[in-house]
Amino acid sequence: MIPTEAAAAIASIERTHDRLRNTLDGLTDDAVREPSRLPDWTRGHVLAHLAGFGEAAERQVLRALAAQDAGEFYDGGRSGRDAAIEEGAHASAAELVARVTAVVDRMEGLLDLLDDDHLRLPTAYGDGLPVSALVMAWWREFSIHLTDLDLGTTHTMWSPELREHLVTFLAPRVPAGAQLALEPTDVDEQRRIGQGSLIVLRGTANDLVAWLAGREPLGPVEAHRADGEPVDLPALGPWPRPVRAAARNG
């Protein structure tokens, strides 16, 4: 039986894929050259990244299922990844959409094959994390970057399950000496992450998680100390690097 977290991720991934297909339908060359929500990246860069990540992840799952050597996650490592994104970003809209949707279709087929034993198989992702961790990474990458395309889909689509996963994954971004109390104004999902002096953050649940993910909230996110004194939002640390000790198999 597939663990609960992985099962929730796979169900959510399929819904995200559907949103992505609808979002990309009719995308033009002019639109793909326009800025995304990410600094210095066009929509073409975002799509090239999704295609490159998707192809690398697919390759890892196939190698794991075939008991083959995992090799590198990206051909040429990080520098190879970056060069491929820059080159791919200048492809036509039709080429980028075809590449992304093709790998999405193939990955859906692979996800349908996975069982509990498959999810434990090692990959090159995070220097040996299992297939389950790669499924979670796919969930994050496609859910977040779909909103980065700035084509009408926003982080308001993020489910409670995705929010819970993202808060856990992104907790290492909390600065040293601080504890963040996330207190959504729209749902009962209070969480505390980090250790140290308490800072209370209030906003909608999706805006709080979007801020934690380094994305612009759609509404106000306010911070104050335990005594109610307003403070600036804390500066977050870098995106967590997936490592073997951080594997979460559900």
Image: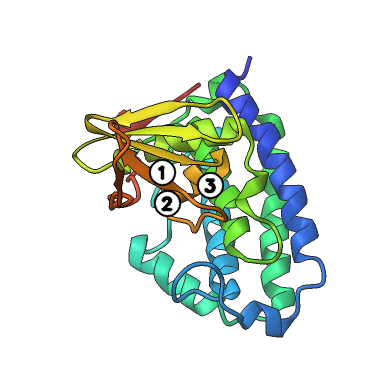
Mark before the other along the chain sequence, 2 or 3: 2
Instruction: Give how far across and how far down residue 98 sits, in percent.
Output: 73, 67
> Could you tell me how far apart the alpha carbons at marks 2 and 3 are, in whole angstroms?
32 Å
Mark 3 falls on what kind of element? Answer: helix
Residue drawn at x 68%, y 65% is: 99
Instruction: Give how far across and how far down residue 154 sits, in percent.
Output: 64, 55
Q: Is residue 49 left or right of residue 225?
A: right
Q: Toward which corner of the image does residue 26 lie, by quadrant? A: bottom right
Judge the density around disc 3: few (<14), some (14-19), many (≥20) Cα neighbours within 10 Å: many
Residue drawn at x 71%, y 83% is: 29
Judge the density around disc 1: few (<14), some (14-19), many (≥20) Cα neighbours within 10 Å: many
Frontmost of labels 1 and 3 is: 3
- Count of all numbered marks drawn on residues in the image: 3
Vertical position of residue 105 compared to residue 68: above or below: below
Per the image, the residue denoted by label 3 is 207
Q: Give the residue type at disc 3.
A: Asp
Q: Give the residue type at disc 1.
A: Tyr
Q: Give the residue type at disc 2.
A: Phe
The disc label shown at residue 73, or none: 2
Instruction: Give how far across and how far down residue 158 sits, in percent.
Output: 62, 42
Per the image, the residue denoted by label 1 is 125
